Image (spheres, helix red, strand yellow):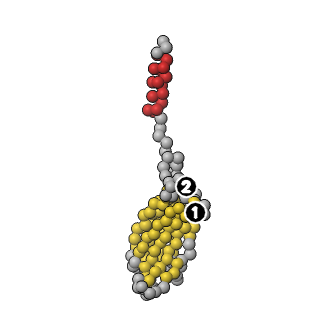
Amino acid sequence: MRLRVPLLLAAVAATGLLTATPATAAPAATVPYAADSGDSCKRGSTEGTLEWVTGPVIRPTVKVAGTLSDEREFSTCAPDDMYSRASFSAYHGADKVAGGQVKADDATVPVALTLADASGVRPIDRVVVQVCRYSNSPVGISYCGPAQEYKAP
């Protein structure tokens, strides 16, 4: 009888482990984003989504998906010799924990970035998006549109 009780307890524990559901991530929250170069022609612009992915098991990240356009096809403004760059900066509190950039020159390009703290521990609580334009020649001007801030939902 003494041997049966531990075997029965072991069988019950093993059954519980086999039928337990694995820990899953919390549902992702998606926020739309948009930013432009700030000029009257809106020569550079980006738009898409920021997807906050968090959970007890996975690394907290923000997935950036969208497009960056430079010199839209239908514009009344004359083409210039500049390109656009969209910057994505991720913060935990006041600390910048990750960043990424995408460049477009007279085209529309996809934006696909994953932002995460290098330590893999600190969650991202806000993302700042900004579009700047730069000259293709060694000597030239550059300017940036207003930075747009998006907080974690």
Q: Earlier in the sequence, mark 1 or mark 2?
A: 1
Q: Please tell me how many numbered marks the rendered image carries.
A: 2
- Residue positioned 41% across, 83% down in the render: 136
**Relative to 80, does residue 56 appear above or below in the rendering?**
above
Residue 125 in which image quadrant? bottom right
CA gap between label 1 and label 2 equals 10 Å
In the structure shown, which secondary structural element does the residue marked by tag 2 occupy? loop
Q: In the rendered image, is residue 51 in sight?
A: no
Q: Name the residue under label 1.
A: 95
Residue 34 is labelled as none
Q: How crowded is mark 1: few (under 14 residues within 10 Å), some or many (20 or more)?
A: few
Whether residue 20 appears in this view of the structure is yes
Q: Position of residue 117 (x, y in %)?
A: 51, 58
At label 1, the amino acid type is: Asp
The image quarter in which residue 145 lies: bottom right
Q: Quick one: SS at disc 1?
A: strand
Outermost residue on the right side: it is: 93
| Residue at the image position 51 percent from the left and 81 percent from the top | 143
Residue 73: x and y, percent?
Answer: 40, 79
Residue extending furthest toward the front: 119
For the point 44% across and 63% down, the residue is 113
Residue 113, placed above or below residue 107: above
* Residue 85 rendering spot, x and y as whole percentages: 46, 74
Q: Position of residue 45 (x, y in %)?
A: 48, 74
For image coordinates 50% across by 67% down, the residue present is: 88
**Are dots 1 and 2 in contact, CB under 8 Å?**
yes
Amino acid beneath label 2 = Arg
Q: Name the residue under label 2.
A: 122
